[in-house]
Image (cartoon, rainbow, N blue to C red):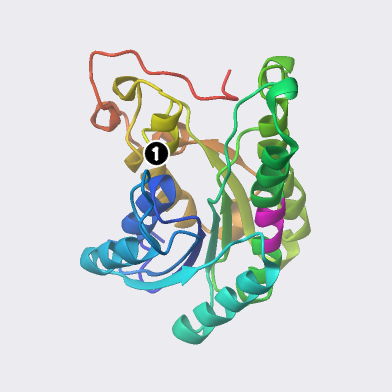
Amino acid sequence: MTSLRDKTLFITGGSRGIGRAIALRAAADGARIAIAAKTAEPHPKLPGTIHSVAAEIRDAGGEALPLAVDIRDEEQLAEAVKETVRAFDGIDILVNNASALFLADTANTPMKRFDLMFDINVRGTYAASQATLPHLARAANPHILTLSPPLQLNQQWFADHCAYTMSKYGMSMCVLGMAHEFRSKGIAVNALWPRYMIQTAASSMLAVDPEGCRSADIMADAAHAILSRASKRCTGNFYLDDEVLAEEGVQDFDHYRLHPATPLIPDLFVA
Protein backbone atom coordinates (compact mmCIF):
# COMPACT_ATOMS: atom_id res chain seq x y z
CA MET A 1 0.00 0.00 0.00
CA THR A 2 1.40 3.37 -1.01
CA SER A 3 -1.55 5.64 -0.27
CA LEU A 4 -3.62 6.57 2.78
CA ARG A 5 -6.65 7.35 0.65
CA ASP A 6 -9.91 6.74 2.56
CA LYS A 7 -8.00 5.88 5.73
CA THR A 8 -9.11 7.56 8.96
CA LEU A 9 -6.41 9.06 11.16
CA PHE A 10 -6.96 10.22 14.74
CA ILE A 11 -4.12 12.63 15.54
CA THR A 12 -3.64 14.02 19.03
CA GLY A 13 -2.22 17.52 19.38
CA GLY A 14 -2.32 18.14 15.65
CA SER A 15 -3.07 21.86 15.60
CA ARG A 16 0.52 22.80 14.75
CA GLY A 17 4.03 21.49 14.15
CA ILE A 18 4.71 17.86 13.33
CA GLY A 19 1.13 16.72 13.95
CA ARG A 20 -0.13 19.27 11.43
CA ALA A 21 2.51 18.21 8.89
CA ILE A 22 1.52 14.54 9.23
CA ALA A 23 -2.13 15.49 8.78
CA LEU A 24 -1.48 17.50 5.63
CA ARG A 25 0.65 14.73 4.11
CA ALA A 26 -2.16 12.23 4.67
CA ALA A 27 -4.71 14.72 3.37
CA ALA A 28 -2.84 14.89 0.07
CA ASP A 29 -3.76 11.21 -0.38
CA GLY A 30 -7.42 11.89 0.37
CA ALA A 31 -7.39 10.63 3.96
CA ARG A 32 -9.97 11.44 6.62
CA ILE A 33 -8.42 13.12 9.62
CA ALA A 34 -9.66 13.87 13.13
CA ILE A 35 -7.59 16.62 14.75
CA ALA A 36 -7.93 16.10 18.50
CA ALA A 37 -6.20 19.01 20.18
CA LYS A 38 -6.77 21.58 22.89
CA THR A 39 -6.33 24.76 20.81
CA ALA A 40 -9.76 25.73 19.49
CA GLU A 41 -9.16 29.49 19.70
CA PRO A 42 -6.06 31.33 18.44
CA HIS A 43 -3.18 31.35 20.92
CA PRO A 44 -1.43 34.70 21.48
CA LYS A 45 2.04 33.17 20.98
CA LEU A 46 1.53 29.93 19.06
CA PRO A 47 0.21 29.47 15.50
CA GLY A 48 -2.66 27.20 14.52
CA THR A 49 -5.95 25.90 15.85
CA ILE A 50 -7.93 22.74 15.19
CA HIS A 51 -10.10 24.79 12.82
CA SER A 52 -7.24 26.33 10.83
CA VAL A 53 -5.64 22.91 10.36
CA ALA A 54 -9.00 21.42 9.39
CA ALA A 55 -9.30 24.06 6.67
CA GLU A 56 -5.80 23.23 5.45
CA ILE A 57 -6.65 19.52 5.38
CA ARG A 58 -9.69 20.17 3.21
CA ASP A 59 -7.70 22.42 0.90
CA ALA A 60 -5.10 19.63 0.55
CA GLY A 61 -7.75 17.13 -0.55
CA GLY A 62 -8.70 15.37 2.67
CA GLU A 63 -11.69 15.30 4.99
CA ALA A 64 -11.36 16.90 8.41
CA LEU A 65 -13.00 16.70 11.80
CA PRO A 66 -11.74 19.31 14.27
CA LEU A 67 -12.21 18.15 17.86
CA ALA A 68 -11.46 20.27 20.92
CA VAL A 69 -9.93 17.71 23.27
CA ASP A 70 -7.78 17.83 26.37
CA ILE A 71 -6.34 14.31 26.29
CA ARG A 72 -5.84 14.45 30.04
CA ASP A 73 -9.64 14.14 30.28
CA GLU A 74 -10.63 10.57 29.43
CA GLU A 75 -14.30 11.49 28.97
CA GLN A 76 -13.40 14.14 26.38
CA LEU A 77 -11.12 11.65 24.68
CA ALA A 78 -13.78 8.93 24.62
CA GLU A 79 -16.33 11.34 23.15
CA ALA A 80 -13.84 12.47 20.49
CA VAL A 81 -13.26 8.85 19.46
CA LYS A 82 -17.03 8.32 19.26
CA GLU A 83 -17.45 11.44 17.13
CA THR A 84 -14.70 10.27 14.79
CA VAL A 85 -16.29 6.85 14.36
CA ARG A 86 -19.71 8.43 13.75
CA ALA A 87 -18.27 10.80 11.15
CA PHE A 88 -15.88 8.42 9.37
CA ASP A 89 -17.20 4.95 10.24
CA GLY A 90 -14.08 3.76 12.03
CA ILE A 91 -10.45 4.55 12.85
CA ASP A 92 -7.51 3.06 10.96
CA ILE A 93 -4.59 4.97 12.43
CA LEU A 94 -3.76 6.64 15.74
CA VAL A 95 -0.93 9.16 15.83
CA ASN A 96 0.16 9.91 19.40
CA ASN A 97 1.62 13.33 18.72
CA ALA A 98 0.49 15.39 21.73
CA SER A 99 3.37 16.14 24.07
CA ALA A 100 4.39 18.60 26.77
CA LEU A 101 7.96 19.89 26.99
CA PHE A 102 9.85 21.38 29.91
CA LEU A 103 13.63 21.10 29.93
CA ALA A 104 15.00 21.68 33.42
CA ASP A 105 16.95 19.78 36.02
CA THR A 106 15.37 18.23 39.09
CA ALA A 107 15.77 21.26 41.37
CA ASN A 108 14.14 23.55 38.82
CA THR A 109 11.20 21.41 37.68
CA PRO A 110 8.02 22.42 39.52
CA MET A 111 5.78 19.47 40.31
CA LYS A 112 3.03 21.17 38.31
CA ARG A 113 5.26 20.85 35.22
CA PHE A 114 6.17 17.27 36.14
CA ASP A 115 2.50 16.33 36.39
CA LEU A 116 1.66 18.07 33.10
CA MET A 117 4.33 16.13 31.19
CA PHE A 118 3.30 12.79 32.66
CA ASP A 119 -0.42 13.48 32.19
CA ILE A 120 -0.04 14.42 28.52
CA ASN A 121 2.95 12.39 27.40
CA VAL A 122 2.52 9.10 29.22
CA ARG A 123 -1.10 9.02 30.33
CA GLY A 124 -2.32 10.70 27.14
CA THR A 125 -0.52 8.18 24.92
CA TYR A 126 -1.83 5.27 26.98
CA ALA A 127 -5.39 6.65 27.11
CA ALA A 128 -5.59 7.44 23.39
CA SER A 129 -4.26 3.99 22.53
CA GLN A 130 -6.79 2.38 24.86
CA ALA A 131 -9.71 4.47 23.57
CA THR A 132 -9.04 3.75 19.90
CA LEU A 133 -8.09 0.08 20.36
CA PRO A 134 -11.53 -1.49 19.67
CA HIS A 135 -11.79 0.42 16.41
CA LEU A 136 -8.22 -0.26 15.32
CA ALA A 137 -8.83 -3.96 15.92
CA ARG A 138 -11.54 -3.85 13.23
CA ALA A 139 -9.45 -1.93 10.68
CA ALA A 140 -7.85 -3.51 7.62
CA ASN A 141 -4.32 -2.19 8.18
CA PRO A 142 -4.26 -0.62 11.66
CA HIS A 143 -1.36 1.43 12.98
CA ILE A 144 -0.42 3.29 16.15
CA LEU A 145 2.45 5.71 15.60
CA THR A 146 3.89 7.45 18.66
CA LEU A 147 6.29 10.37 18.41
CA SER A 148 8.80 9.26 20.99
CA PRO A 149 12.52 8.42 21.08
CA PRO A 150 14.48 5.17 20.96
CA LEU A 151 14.92 3.70 24.42
CA GLN A 152 18.52 4.27 25.44
CA LEU A 153 19.19 4.19 29.18
CA ASN A 154 22.12 6.56 28.92
CA GLN A 155 22.76 8.94 31.82
CA GLN A 156 23.39 11.87 29.48
CA TRP A 157 19.72 11.93 28.45
CA PHE A 158 18.55 12.11 32.07
CA ALA A 159 21.03 14.39 33.79
CA ASP A 160 19.78 17.80 32.63
CA HIS A 161 16.03 17.11 32.22
CA CYS A 162 15.18 13.96 34.13
CA ALA A 163 11.41 14.57 34.28
CA TYR A 164 11.04 15.25 30.56
CA THR A 165 13.16 12.24 29.63
CA MET A 166 11.15 9.94 31.87
CA SER A 167 7.91 11.19 30.32
CA LYS A 168 9.13 10.69 26.74
CA TYR A 169 10.57 7.29 27.57
CA GLY A 170 7.20 6.48 29.12
CA MET A 171 5.67 7.01 25.68
CA SER A 172 8.33 4.73 24.20
CA MET A 173 7.59 2.08 26.82
CA CYS A 174 3.96 2.15 25.65
CA VAL A 175 5.27 1.35 22.17
CA LEU A 176 7.45 -1.47 23.49
CA GLY A 177 4.64 -3.10 25.46
CA MET A 178 1.73 -2.51 23.12
CA ALA A 179 3.62 -3.73 20.05
CA HIS A 180 3.85 -7.14 21.66
CA GLU A 181 0.38 -7.00 23.23
CA PHE A 182 -1.43 -6.00 20.03
CA ARG A 183 0.60 -8.16 17.63
CA SER A 184 -2.03 -10.91 17.58
CA LYS A 185 -4.64 -8.31 16.60
CA GLY A 186 -2.56 -7.24 13.61
CA ILE A 187 -2.12 -3.71 14.97
CA ALA A 188 1.27 -2.17 14.25
CA VAL A 189 2.74 -0.07 17.07
CA ASN A 190 5.84 1.95 16.23
CA ALA A 191 7.74 5.03 17.39
CA LEU A 192 9.14 7.81 15.22
CA TRP A 193 11.72 10.41 16.23
CA PRO A 194 13.77 13.01 14.33
CA ARG A 195 17.51 12.54 13.95
CA TYR A 196 17.99 16.32 13.82
CA MET A 197 16.00 19.16 15.32
CA ILE A 198 12.75 20.06 13.59
CA GLN A 199 11.62 23.65 13.31
CA THR A 200 8.42 23.93 15.34
CA ALA A 201 6.86 26.35 17.80
CA ALA A 202 8.47 24.32 20.58
CA SER A 203 11.96 24.64 19.10
CA SER A 204 11.39 28.38 18.68
CA MET A 205 10.42 28.69 22.35
CA LEU A 206 13.67 26.91 23.25
CA ALA A 207 15.61 29.42 21.13
CA VAL A 208 16.95 26.69 18.84
CA ASP A 209 18.62 28.21 15.78
CA PRO A 210 16.12 27.50 12.97
CA GLU A 211 18.92 27.43 10.42
CA GLY A 212 20.20 24.24 12.07
CA CYS A 213 16.82 22.53 11.79
CA ARG A 214 14.96 20.45 9.27
CA SER A 215 11.37 21.15 8.31
CA ALA A 216 8.51 19.09 9.74
CA ASP A 217 7.98 17.70 6.24
CA ILE A 218 10.64 15.05 6.85
CA MET A 219 8.67 13.67 9.81
CA ALA A 220 5.46 13.80 7.78
CA ASP A 221 7.03 11.89 4.89
CA ALA A 222 8.54 9.32 7.26
CA ALA A 223 5.21 8.88 9.06
CA HIS A 224 3.45 8.41 5.72
CA ALA A 225 5.94 5.71 4.74
CA ILE A 226 5.45 3.82 8.02
CA LEU A 227 1.66 4.09 7.98
CA SER A 228 1.57 2.82 4.40
CA ARG A 229 3.35 -0.41 5.35
CA ALA A 230 1.62 -3.69 6.11
CA SER A 231 0.82 -3.59 9.81
CA LYS A 232 1.42 -7.29 10.41
CA ARG A 233 5.00 -6.99 9.16
CA CYS A 234 5.89 -3.62 10.66
CA THR A 235 5.63 -3.36 14.43
CA GLY A 236 7.77 -2.78 17.50
CA ASN A 237 10.21 -0.44 15.76
CA PHE A 238 11.86 2.75 17.02
CA TYR A 239 12.40 4.63 13.79
CA LEU A 240 14.44 7.74 13.01
CA ASP A 241 12.95 9.90 10.28
CA ASP A 242 15.74 9.81 7.70
CA GLU A 243 16.34 6.13 8.39
CA VAL A 244 12.76 5.38 7.32
CA LEU A 245 13.09 7.43 4.16
CA ALA A 246 16.41 5.82 3.30
CA GLU A 247 14.62 2.46 3.44
CA GLU A 248 12.19 3.91 0.89
CA GLY A 249 15.05 4.79 -1.44
CA VAL A 250 15.48 8.47 -0.56
CA GLN A 251 19.12 9.52 -0.83
CA ASP A 252 18.98 13.32 -0.85
CA PHE A 253 17.70 15.02 2.30
CA ASP A 254 18.89 18.53 1.52
CA HIS A 255 15.44 19.84 0.62
CA TYR A 256 14.38 19.28 4.22
CA ARG A 257 17.12 21.58 5.54
CA LEU A 258 16.15 25.15 6.34
CA HIS A 259 19.63 26.42 5.56
CA PRO A 260 21.93 24.29 3.39
CA ALA A 261 25.19 25.69 4.79
CA THR A 262 24.40 25.46 8.50
CA PRO A 263 25.31 22.24 10.39
CA LEU A 264 22.26 20.35 11.55
CA ILE A 265 21.56 20.18 15.29
CA PRO A 266 21.13 16.63 16.61
CA ASP A 267 17.89 16.09 18.47
CA LEU A 268 17.68 14.85 22.05
CA PHE A 269 18.04 11.11 22.64
CA VAL A 270 19.98 10.52 19.43
CA ALA A 271 23.57 9.39 19.90
Q: Amino acid at mark 1?
A: Ala
Residue 214 is inside the magenta segment: no
The answer to whether 23 is drawn above or below residue 75 in the figure is: above
Quadrant where the N terminus lies? bottom left
The answer to whether 207 is drawn above or below residue 17 in the figure is: above
In the image, taking residue 209 as reference, residue 58 lies left or right, namely left
Q: How many marks?
A: 1
Q: Is residue 36 visible?
A: yes
Label 1 neighbour load within 10 Å: few <14, some 14-19, many 20+: some
Give residue 108's position: percent from left, percent from top. Answer: 69, 23
The answer to whether 232 is drawn above or below residue 132 in the figure is: above
Give residue 47's position: percent from left, percent from top. Answer: 33, 48
Give residue 59's position: percent from left, percent from top. Answer: 21, 66
SS of the residue under disc 1: helix
Q: Residue at x 46, y 27 (%)?
A: 206
Camera-nearest residue between 199 and 28:
199
Q: Is residue 172 visible?
A: no
Residue on which the image places disc 1? 201
Camera-nearest residue between 173 and 225:
173
Give residue 14's position: percent from left, percent from top. Answer: 44, 56
- State the extent of the magenta-drawn residues as a range: 123-127
The answer to whether 94 is drawn above or below residue 8 in the figure is: above
Camera-nearest residue between 202 and 14:
202
Quadrant where the C terminus lies? top right
Dividing the picture into quadrants, the one containing residue 265 is: top left
Q: Residue at x 61, y 61 (%)?
A: 71
Helix, strand or loop for the magenta stretch, by majority: helix
Dividing the picture into quadrants, the one containing residue 150 is: top right
In the image, taking residue 73 as reference, residue 87 lies left or right, namely left
Dividing the picture into quadrants, the one containing residue 157 is: top right
